[in-house]
Amino acid sequence: MIYWHLFLAFFIPGILGYGGGPASIPLVEHEVVGNYEWMTTQEFSEVVAIGNSLPGPIATKMAGYIGYTEAGVLGSIVAMFASVAPSLLLMIGMMAILLKYKDEPEVKNLTKIIRPVIAILLGFMTIQFGQESVEGIGPGYTLFLMVASFVLLEKVKLHPAFVIALALVFGAITGL
């Protein structure tokens, strides 16, 4: 039964997560944290952080890790297949239609409509992660990590993997 649950946990966000990995992260979180309770919000945010620091699509990295932690190698394979299956099936099915109507204004405007929805979903997830951080390590450390991460990413142009590694070192040194 765990394989079926893993399949559903990553297949459903794959169907509903229009816009790629960032759009499906809140949907995966709902399944993994809220529905099946395989992880806490804090654990999920750590998986997202580590997944973002590695090359490749975030959804398949999360699926591989979560599938492996829940059901071993076969669970990892099932979860990764489930995360790519909707896109694969829909791309094959829709290719002919999109090529036929690619110059229509309705198709061009679809992206303009979807972007605000994705931004709102990511905003809610950011607020939730921030609240968890404030509850876990306090507002001072949370604010420091947010500002330091912003400066390192946007001003210094440091790779996200190094920012995450520095945050881990900071947490180890301070005992957080």
Image (cartoon, rainbow, N blue to C red):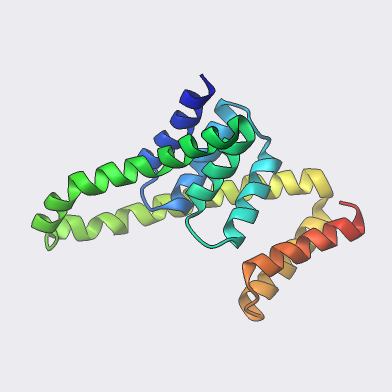
Which of these two is toward me, 24 or 117?
24
Residue 61, image x and y in percent? 54, 49
Lateral position of residue 104 relative to residue 72, left or right? left
Q: Residue furthest right?
A: 174
Residue shown at the point (67%, 80%) measured from the top left: 156
Residue at 33% x, 46% y: name it.
87
**Could you tell whether 67 is left or right of 137 in the image?**
left
Residue that appears at 19% across and 44% down: 93
Q: Residue furthest left?
A: 100
Between 75 and 129, the residue placed more toward the observer is 75
Residue 168, quarter of the rendered image: bottom right
Write the residue at 70% across / 45% down. Answer: 131
Q: Return the residue found at the far top.
A: 1
In the rendering, at what x and y percent does residue 67 appear?
56, 36
Count numbered badges in the picture: 0
Q: Position of residue 23 (x, y in %)?
A: 44, 49
Residue closest to the far bottom:
156
In the picture shown, does residue 149 fall above or below 59? Answer: below
| 111 on left or right of 105 | right
Query: Residue 60's spot in the image, x, y percent?
Result: 48, 48
Using the image, determine if residue 32 lies above or below residue 49: above
Q: Quadrant of residue 111?
A: bottom left
